[in-house]
Image: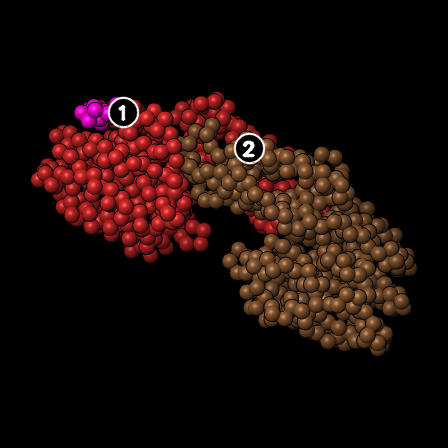
Chain colours: A brown, B red
Amino acid sequence: MNINPTRLQQHFEAMSLIGKIGEIGTCRPAHTALEKQGFELAASWMNEAGMKTHIDNFGNLIGRLEGTNASLPVLMMGSHLDSQPYGGRFDGVAGVLCAIEAVMTLKENNITPTRSIEIISFADEEGWRFNKGLFGSKGILGKLEVADLERTDKDGITRAQALKDFGCDITKFKESEYKPGSIFCFLELHIEQGPVLDIANKPIGVVSGISGPLWLTVKLKGMAGHAGSVPMAIRKDALVGAAEIIVALNEIATLIPGAPTVGTVGTLNVFPASRNIIPEEVTFTVDLRDIDLERRHRYEKQLMERIESITKKHQLTYSISEDTNSEPRYCADWIKTIIHDECKALGLDAPELMSGPFHDALTLSYACDYGMIFIRSKDGISHNPLEYSSYEDLALGTNVLLGTVLQILKK
Amino acid sequence: MNINPTRLQQHFEAMSLIGKIGEIGTCRPAHTALEKQGFELAASWMNEAGMKTHIDNFGNLIGRLEGTNASLPVLMMGSHLDSQPYGGRFDGVAGVLCAIEAVMTLKENNITPTRSIEIISFADEEGWRFNKGLFGSKGILGKLEVADLERTDKDGITRAQALKDFGCDITKFKESEYKPGSIFCFLELHIEQGPVLDIANKPIGVVSGISGPLWLTVKLKGMAGHAGSVPMAIRKDALVGAAEIIVALNEIATLIPGAPTVGTVGTLNVFPASRNIIPEEVTFTVDLRDIDLERRHRYEKQLMERIESITKKHQLTYSISEDTNSEPRYCADWIKTIIHDECKALGLDAPELMSGPFHDALTLSYACDYGMIFIRSKDGISHNPLEYSSYEDLALGTNVLLGTVLQILKK
């Protein structure tokens, strides 16, 4: 039994037109009309595959193929259709479209499973719009905090408002939650977003786990003053402090050459932002990840010490909020074994690797066993319009996913 | 002959209500309805002082007290009523209101000068809205470039559009220009915006000159990528590069402890600005000033070398645009002598000092002799709501200005 690579490619190409930027880029923000358009297109394919579809109160698109025994916990697959503001065509999209292709293939082969299958396109996996991700997957597991709804985007729109505008009823979250034990397992196919498979020249990888990030927001406060007259010695320049902290984070994350530690400052805002005023306030985000949680904790401590000494030197005050603090979460051995077996059956030598980026599977890992299939990313580029995975590799990965689904349905 | 300190204070207090932020701050951006409101209030006082007023095609407010010999070059005074986005109540305002108070005092004493007197509130001295300042003073001297009209503010509004919205006819700039030789001299009273007078415990200073700034815009380009998966060793992180350059500028500007060199990065923008994307593009401004032009040139060269090596290290490309490059401009000795004499007559020991910040007088210095009176700034704070000069000091300074005007009118 094989998937249809031509149809799969057509689906990718059709989806890439929604929120297209430049020649090959995508900007499809969460909870927007563009994401809704993406949902409608994906839902039409889910319907073709025999699934019933709806959008829940968290803004997730859910397709369900009813099994002959509807009381069994579901086999869930999925990923997300929202994109980075300056993103590519494959991140998230692959996990939704390849899952749909697998279910379409089941239908073409007249297979009606005993266990129901669901495919979810989770709302706001990316997290840039409201500065916190994995919204939809946390939602269905009852893991949201009230503050998550109060977060605002750069236009001052709250998450609550964005959900209402999207057509969600935020007073009825409970109706969209999944009961404990109702999910049998979760499968997510995703592009690697890193260079490991490309360097090893392997199209497919078996994920061993996800090293979740530590996300901080750091706010420094100094004192504004005229850039032409306040002597250097008495300045309290919040941007000079921030710059030294960024340099320090970069030093810490590169202490051990070749280690998988990564540290990034992705956003930084200056107030009052006038070219002849000394910056009074600077706010920036920190993203720190490591497969080795002990080491990440050690580095976090070192960063805190540097922030303390740098702000003291420049007479700045500071505050730090912890937005996300995820531990590494490992894939279920039995699912990894099935994925390995399916790769072998297709003649693939698939290496096992950790995921630096997080995925919706990270949230699901707290509710059920999970497995992930990685597709090679050209030059390891992602979160960038240049992100690229070949349709051959994606078709291979979808066949591995289909085989894995068939094996799991036997359980 | 003395000015009226109570009236002067009332004028400051009334003006501070227009664009008031917080308890004591001001945000009165150039070419806006708020600046127009400020102009209307100032014009009403100019009229009381016997002046005719109009707003020219550069958005300058001009008040003219006609002399008995209208063919003589004018004695010009002024400053600006636009403020920083997060500014105070005195920067610029002092130069307009104290000049009006001086002319009101002439009128009360029935003095009609032979030479006409003009007071100008120059448009967009501050320069933050369109990232380039001294617009109105450059305008009246025919020193604008076409590109100055194409600059956009953060909302994408061009300078040309803002001027049109303000009621200016940008096709008739020529009508608002001053012919060479038509300005006899220029006087500007201003708060110091630095700590020199406050530390010396002197209310009034005599300005010796203005050390103009070098203004650069630096753009770094790297490569976006996923913050969780791109190994540190192969990153091209534009923000890490920018941070190292900011640290380098700070080092260069503090090479000689106690030197009057100042170096500032006041604005910085990150693209695409998502917490889990490696920054692809960072744009920031550089403000470098020194009374010693040779040293400033040397430091500029050092900064360029550091930008070259830092961007090379991080595999970034860069471009630098020079937005302003002013030389130090010295006050006329004969005007300084008059100001010193007037200070002595009032029993004041007024030190002479350079101005780090630029002022409209910098532009006027290319058209006529100029003099400046500085008022003590508490703790040297400016470009900040906490900016403060006492009404006693301002009244003293206005009496010095009045005396200076009376002496100049004898010439």
Residue ID at (28%, 39%): B94
For label 2, the residue is A312
Position of residue B389 measured from the top left corner of the image (x, y, whole percent): 31, 36
The quarter of the image holding the N terminus of chain B is top left
Q: From the viewer's perspective, is B364 left or right of B291?
A: left
**Quick check: is B343 in the magenta stretch?**
yes
Which of the numbered marks, if any, corresponds to residue A234?
none
Q: Between marks 1 and 2, how big is the CA–CA gap?
A: 37 Å
Residue at disc 1, secondary structure? loop
Q: Which chain carries label 1?
A: B
Q: Position of residue A240 (x, y in %)?
A: 53, 35
Q: Mark 1 points at which residue?
A: B350
Q: Is residue A69 above or below residue A213?
A: below
Q: In which quarter of the image is residue A59?
A: bottom right
Indicate the quadrant containing the C terminus of chain B: top left, top right, bottom left or bottom right.
top left
Residue B121 sits above or below residue B33 on the image: above
Q: In terms of depth relative to the viewer, which is nearer, A146 or A80?
A: A146
Which chain letter goes with mark 2?
Answer: A
Q: What stretch is highlighted in magenta?
A: B339-350
The count of marks equals: 2
Disc 2 element: helix
| Near-viewer residue (B395 or A355) | B395
- Residue at (20%, 43%) from the top-left corner? B7
Q: Is residue B179 in view?
A: no
Seen at 40% across and 33% down, the residue is: A228
Residue B67, magenta (yes or no)? no
Density class for disc 2 (Cα within 10 Å; few <14, some 14-19, many ≥20) is few
| Residue type marked 1 | Ala
Which residue type does callout 2 highlight? Lys
Residues packed near mark 1 inside 10 Å, few (<14), some (14 to 19) or many (20 plus): many
Q: Is B119 drawn above or below residue B344 in the view shown?
A: below
Residue A248 rendering spot, x and y as whole percentages: 63, 35
